[in-house]
Amino acid sequence: MDYLEIEGGSPLCGEVRIQGSKNAALPILSAALQSPGVTVLENCPAITDAASMLEILEGYGCKTRREGNRLIIDAGEVHPGRAPKDCAGVMRSSIMLLGSLLGRMGEAFLPYPGGCVIGKRPIDLHLEALRQMGARLWEEPEGVRAVCRRAKGAQIRLPFPSVGATENVILLAVRAEGVTVLQNAAREPEIEELCRFLTGMGARIEGAGTGTIRIRGVRELHETEYRIMPDRIVAGTYMLLAAAAGGKVVLTEVPLGQLTAVRQVLKAMGARQESRGDSLFLWCPGRCRGGVRIRTAPYPGFPTDLQSPLMAALCLADGESVIDEQIFEARFKAAKELCRMGADIRIRGSKAFIKGTERLTGARVEAEELRGGAALCIAAAAAEGTSRILQYHYIARGYENIIRDLKALGVMVQCR
Ligand code: EPZ
């Protein structure tokens, strides 16, 4: 099984362009199923989750082609089918097909979604919201069966601003009869991106990016082309890498406006940041400051997806910090691996207490999930000596080519 070998301890120096957004591309790929013809997506990251989603779309009759970062999806002749279990079961985003399949075909069978082991990842909010729009759903041993011949607009209020549930409601509501008003909707930038894409297909949506989204269903959607926005989590990962390893980096095509919470934490840690257009110049004169106390929260709060990368950077900061993970119940998996590199982290309930140390030492560590794996890359680049990061495939689910990017930033890394 492939592993990464990283020779750490040298300050960074280099430049990298931020890839297209995984968490924007995946719901948009689901939405492409509702086109009567061809969708062309530019800047779609070449990540394994996108490849899995394409395989699933082909299971419903779509024809797909990748030309570098351009994806062409022809949904002209789709049919009810079954998502290949080995694809749908490996990632969370397959559940986002439910709204699109019901919108396009009025019926669906989806294996239960898989994804990272960061928590139970229930789908109750998805199913309850779709039921309010007239969908009938059965949770069978192998997956969810759903029928909805003609969805009806509804007044829906989510108990929690779930990103995926918000996306599923939007994906069904765009073709429903009448108006759907979704309250306590997720406000993540990826929701706005999905709504921009659907509007380009002829959907009628107001309030994307706010807590209340209003969708007036239309009979038909049409073909469109779209360029996926940059990935704020990948950008944040490399910003925290620079804070941990030291040196100077330039990141281009950075969605700066989506990273306010992260930039505030980096500023508190002593990282210097200069932005010009969508480029960010970041460097850390000397060791970062600790004493950071953050709680992860729905957007625009500090993103849970950058919690592990931040933990890695705080392991070397000067002082004690506390991270309170409020979104997922099992998202501290990287902590024990970081401790194998000499980090001082104690977990108590939803809180991680990190006492910064002068140095970390390279070690053989194992990724167990996507963002925890990225955190291990950060620690390895900052540690003295050689690290081996096993189960690299988890990282490839969301980072298009972390080896290419780390090398571009001056990290000595090989895939073995
Ligand atoms: C999306 O997951 C992202 N994935 C996650 O990114 C991200 O961490 C998460 O949103 C929060 O921002 C994609 O967009 C593909 P949620 P999602 O529904 O939609 C609970 C990454 O690393 N919940 O907002 O699954 C759930 O258990 C991934 O790129 C229910 O209880 O997140 C969690 O505690 C990881 N019932 C909380 O809500 C439900 O029906 C947030 O989940 C749905 C969710």
Image (cartoon, rainbow, N blue to C red):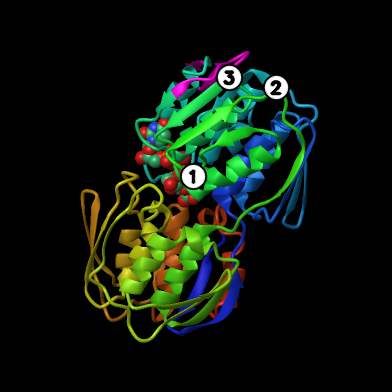
Q: Earlier in the sequence, mark 1 or mark 2?
A: 1
| Residue at which label 1 appears | 209
Instruction: Say whether residue 144 is left or right of residue 290.
Output: right
| Residue at which label 2 appears | 219
* Cβ atoms at labels 3 and 2 below 8 Å apart: no
Q: Amino acid at mark 3?
A: Gly
Instruction: Say whether residue 221 is left or right of residue 295.
Output: right
Q: How many other residues sit within 10 Å of disc 1, few (<14), some (14-19) or many (≥20)?
A: some
Where is 371 relative to 49, above or below?
A: below
Quadrant location of the N terminus in the rendered image: bottom right
Q: How many other residues sit within 10 Å of disc 3, few (<14), some (14-19) or many (≥20)?
A: some
Instruction: Say whether residue 286 is left or right of residue 95.
Output: left
Res 387 → quadrant: bottom left
| Residue at which label 3 appears | 178
Q: How many other residues sit within 10 Å of disc 2, few (<14), some (14-19) or many (≥20)?
A: few
Q: Which span of residues is magenta-colored?
A: 136-155
State the residue at coordinates (57%, 81%): 14
Which residue is at the far front? 206
In three-dimensional space, the C-alpha distance between marks 1 and 2, rounded to whole angstroms, equals: 24 Å
Q: Amino acid at mark 2?
A: Arg
Comparing 329 with 284, the one in front is 284
Quadrant location of the C terminus in the rendered image: bottom right
* Cβ atoms at labels 1 and 2 below 8 Å apart: no
* Cβ atoms at labels 3 and 1 below 8 Å apart: no
